[in-house]
Image (spheres, rainbow, N blue to C red):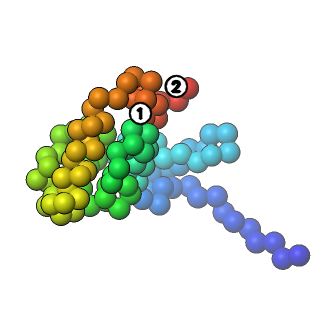
Amino acid sequence: MNLTTINEPTSCPTCDSTLELVKDQLFCRNNECEAKSSKLIEHFAKTLKIKGLGPKTIEKLPLSSISDIYSISENEISDEIGNKLGKKLFDQIEKSKSVDAKTLLPAFSIPLI
């Protein structure tokens, strides 16, 4: 049997911050990490069922935090993804403003909630 040794990464591949090992999982603790922010936004959108706000769209839009989802205008969205899709996504974002707390709280990825 041919075994290959794999070295454990020590830095985040996106922001180059030092990774922290917690219970066999590596974490980037840099709150400014672009990949970390994108994943938080993606989880938030998925949990609130905001259709059209997936990884590719998140990359195109000027979003760096969850709050940016609610401050971006329909025109800004349309400029990046087109008028038809922009209108649909903006409507989905507006619709997500009326979810109940039971749906909203888990969307923030707060541990133990």
The residue under label 1 is which amino acid type? Phe
Residue 36 visible within the image: no
- Which residue is at a point 46% across and 35% down the rendered structure image? 109
**Circle 2 sits in a helix, a strand or a loop, which is it?**
loop
- Which residue is at a point 53% across and 49% down the rendered structure image? 19
Taking 41 as reference, is 16 above or below it?
below
Q: Marks 1 and 2: in contact by CB < 8 Å?
A: yes
Where residue 24 appears, as percent x and y from the top left, is 68, 45
Disc number placed over residue 55 in the picture, else none: none
- Which residue is at a point 76% across and 72% down the rendered structure image? 4
Residue 23 visible within the image: yes
- Number of marks drawn: 2
Query: Upstream in the sequence, badge 2 or badge 1?
Result: 1
Residue matched to label 2: 113
Specify whether 21 is left or right of 16.
Answer: right
The residue under label 2 is which amino acid type? Ile
Where residue 11 appears, as percent x and y from the top left, is 51, 55
Give the alpha-carbon distance from disc 2 to disc 1, as whole Å: 9 Å
Where residue 13 appears, as percent x and y from the top left, is 47, 60
Quadrant of residue 112 in the image? top right
Q: Residues within 10 Å of mark 2 (few under 14, many from 20)?
A: few
Taking 113 as reference, is 66 above or below it?
below
Q: Residues within 10 Å of mark 1 (few under 14, many from 20)?
A: some
Disc number placed over residue 108 in the picture, else none: 1
**Circle 1 sits in a helix, a strand or a loop, which is it?**
loop
Where residue 26 appears, as percent x and y from the top left, is 58, 48
- Which residue is at a point 26% across and 61% down the rendered structure image? 60
Residue projecting furthest to the bottom? 2
Specify whether 84 is left or right of 110.
Answer: left
Quadrant of residue 45 in the image? top left
Front-most of residues 25 and 66: 66
Front-most of residues 92 and 10: 92
